[in-house]
């Protein structure tokens, strides 16, 4: 189903003028603040629908400012952007584990932030299923930002530029944590990556010509990868055990830590393949430095276990996915077509 | 201020005071006017007695002697049902409350309850998924409050519906600690529960009559009721897909209304 959703605030203002007699200047002030959020035609339906959080330019601007503000951490050194770098599709390129407060190290690789509004389960383990609550997790995490929401607000309240933005976006002169988390959610929703060479190919747009090797890779992807890295989001947003050898030191049980259910042991969120050339190292613990290593893992190193995803058990009993060297190269070439430079270089983000 | 105590164990009394009771009771339902406040007071018991925290109690059916350091939980979504079965649902946005023995928070106050003769009370333990997924709009104030009371998880964005800890004596007579943090498990397991408490006799609410309802909580039932949950098998129960739902089932059975005070 293809939906083009354009949220035009002008319409909202017009309607509310009909139902209320007096026009207050705040509403007029919002005119021109509408943000048109366009769902790419090759994408599935939106999951986050901006209920009680109408998207506005000022809301996005506020979210962007907060995202880059180290005052969201206890000692004012770590911002969201510290580990979610725009130049790496908002991942932490080159680091298996990100460095948090006081040089502390976490246990999972910082995932890219893109196409968040098309998902409703966040983090490798689904620790949150509410985009507006997502930011709480790294803020509270003792090795990431170790800060509390009320303290952040105390720090920001004296800042005049925030006073203006909170008021403009949410008419919130008190500057509440509610508005802060909503604005961060808005900013994350606009980080849509949908203009890679592959997207242009699918939408028959200029610049979407794929080479024969890339097309071969696309066919291999569709045959072997697309059941999990599904749709043009390149993930089905499910949690699966892909057969990685368990690191005994970390013993990260993944989704099980959220659900407590045996079937979820060692299951992790299926990562999107979008911009994958920018987000190494790979897997939840960043154990693979290159995409070649990742494909070789699926070829040779998938480990059996009670929760191994059945899609990685072939009918003849072999584990993993078989690719020849030549197929691997085609696949790697195809994965490059998922790079979205317009996203990486977008000055608005 | 005249206080009328209605005691529910007066079974015999009910039949032959029925007429005079009706006369005494303020008015017929349709004549009751306005609205008033209903206050719930959560009264924590252990084996039928007023609970003393940090005190070891007699063995339960799991052959374990328990003490509690504190008991904290969320109660929510209050509904009052009148004699005709008509339900008054309290404004959802305001219908989330924290009970915390550590901070002496034991009261839930519902304001502007419409006049009527009410017979039962329905409420939930914890936070329902619908509320959670509504996002920040109504939630944040309550989230911040829960955060202060230790009723949110730190590594997942969810509420702890019940947070309690204490000591228990294992077979060899040694004290060990236990901790129960029970909530929903992301989108996978909804542990929210609700329950209905009937009042053997209806109570009146109107401009002239408010009510104070004492809800007893029998703490022993948390581990020893519908399900037997021995702590020696697992003393720290946090995200446990097997035990968390059983503890919530048990929690459903631990409340009862002990008396209602009509406040004139």
Image (cartoon, rainbow, N blue to C red):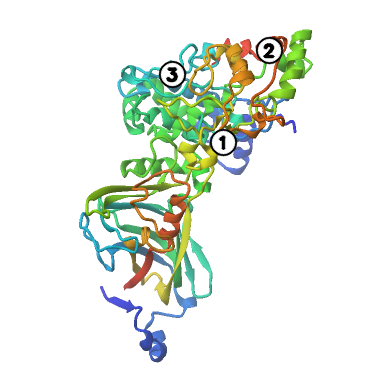
**Above or below, B183 relative to A8:** below
Q: Earlier in the sequence, mark 1 or mark 3?
A: 3
In the image, taking residue A190 as reference, residue B228 lies left or right, namely left
Which chain is indicated by disc 1? A
Q: CA distance from mark 3 to mark 2?
A: 27 Å
User: In the structure shown, which secondary structural element does the residue marked by tag 2 occupy?
Assistant: helix
Q: Position of residue B155 (x, y in %)?
A: 41, 34
Label 2 is found on which chain of the structure? A
User: Considering only vertical position in the picture, is A184 above or below A216?
Assistant: below
Give the image location of residue A98, x and y in percent. Answer: 42, 18
* Residue A36 in the image: above or below residue A340: below
Give the number of the disc on residue A97: 3
Task: Identify whether A246 is placed above or below B244.
Answer: above
Residue identified by numbered label 2: A328
Residue under label 1, please give it. A307
Task: Give A261 or A322, whichever is nearer the viewer.
Answer: A322
Instruction: Residue at 25%, 50% (x, y): give it.
Output: B103
Which is nearer the eye, B236 or A322? A322
Dot 3 alpha-carbon crowd within 10 angstroms: few under 14, some 14 to 19, many 20 or more: many
Which element carries disc 3, helix, strand or loop?
A: loop
Position of A269 compared to A248: left or right? right
Residue depicted at x 28% and y 64%:
B45
Q: Does the CB distance between marks 3 and 2 fall below 8 Å?
A: no
Q: Quadrant of residue A148?
A: top left
Q: State which quarter of the image contains the N terminus of chain B.
A: bottom left
């Amino acid at each position: 189903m293809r939906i083009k959703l354009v949220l035009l605030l002008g319409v909202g203002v017009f309607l509310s003028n009909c139902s209320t007699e007096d026009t207050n200047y705040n509403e007029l002030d919002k005119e021109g603040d509408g943000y048109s959020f366009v769902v790419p035609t090759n994408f599935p339906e939106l999951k986050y629908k901006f209920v009680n959080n109408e998207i506005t330019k000022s809301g996005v601007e506020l979210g962007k400012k907060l995202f880059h503000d180290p005052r969201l951490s206890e000692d004012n050194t770590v911002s969201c952007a510290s580990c979610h770098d725009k130049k790496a599709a908002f991942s932490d390129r080159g680091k298996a584990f990100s460095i948090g407060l006081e040089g502390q190290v976490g246990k999972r690789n910082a995932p890219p932030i893109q196409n968040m509004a098309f998902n409703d389960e966040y983090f490798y383990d689904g620790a949150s299923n509410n985009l507006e609550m997502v930011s709480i997790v790294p803020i509270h995490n003792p090795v990431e930002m170790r800060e509390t929401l009320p303290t952040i607000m105390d720090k920001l309240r004296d800042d005049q530029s925030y006073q203006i933005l909170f008021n403009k976006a949410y008419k919130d002169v008190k500057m509440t944590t509610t508005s802060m988390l909503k604005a961060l959610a808005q900013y994350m929703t606009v980080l849509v990556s949908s203009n890679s060479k592959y997207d242009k190919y699918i939408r028959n747009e200029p610049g979407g010509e794929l080479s024969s090797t890339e097309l071969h890779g696309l066919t291999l992807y569709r045959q072997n990868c697309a059941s999990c890295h599904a749709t043009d989001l390149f993930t089905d947003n499910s949690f699966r055990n892909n057969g990685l050898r368990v690191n005994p030191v970390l013993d990260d049980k993944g989704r099980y830590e959220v659900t407590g259910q045996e079937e979820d042991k060692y299951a992790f969120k299926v990562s999107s393949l979008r911009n994958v050339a920018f987000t190494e190292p790979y897997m939840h613990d960043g154990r693979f430095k290159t995409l070649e290593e990742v494909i070789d893992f699926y070829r040779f190193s998938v480990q059996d276990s009670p929760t191994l995803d059945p899609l990685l058990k072939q009918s003849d009993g072999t584990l993993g996915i078989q690719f020849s060297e030549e197929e691997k190269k085609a696949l790697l070439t195809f994965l490059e077509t998922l790079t979205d430079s317009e996203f990486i270089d977008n000055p608005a983000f | 201020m005249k206080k009328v105590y209605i005691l529910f164990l007066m079974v015999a009394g009910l039949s032959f005071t029925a007429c005079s009771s009706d006369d005494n009771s303020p008015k017929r339902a349709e004549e009751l006017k306005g609205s008033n406040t209903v206050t719930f007071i959560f009264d924590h018991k252990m084996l039928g007695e007023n609970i003393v925290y940090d005190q070891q109690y007699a063995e339960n059916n799991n052959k374990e002697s328990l003490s509690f350091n504190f008991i904290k939980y969320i109660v929510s979504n209050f509904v009052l049902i009148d004699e005709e079965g008509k339900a008054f649902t309290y404004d959802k946005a305001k219908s989330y409350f924290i009970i915390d023995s550590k901070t002496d928070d034991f009261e839930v106050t519902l304001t502007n309850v419409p006049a009527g003769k009410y017979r039962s009370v329905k409420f939930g333990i914890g936070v329902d998924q619908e509320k959670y997924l509504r996002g920040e709009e109504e939630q944040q104030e309550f989230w911040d409050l829960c955060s202060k009371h230790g009723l949110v998880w730190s590594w997942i964005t969810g509420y702890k519906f019940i947070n309690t800890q204490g000591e228990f004596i294992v077979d060899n007579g040694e004290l060990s600690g236990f901790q129960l943090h029970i909530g929903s498990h992301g989108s996978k397991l909804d542990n929210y529960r609700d329950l209905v408490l009937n009042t053997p006799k209806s109570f009146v609410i109107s401009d002239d009559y408010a009510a104070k309802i004492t809800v007893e909580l029998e703490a022993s039932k948390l581990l020893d009721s519908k399900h037997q949950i021995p702590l020696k098998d697992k003393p720290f129960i946090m995200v446990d897909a097997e035990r968390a739902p059983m503890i919530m089932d048990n929690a459903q059975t631990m409340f009862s209304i002990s008396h209602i005070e009509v406040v004139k």
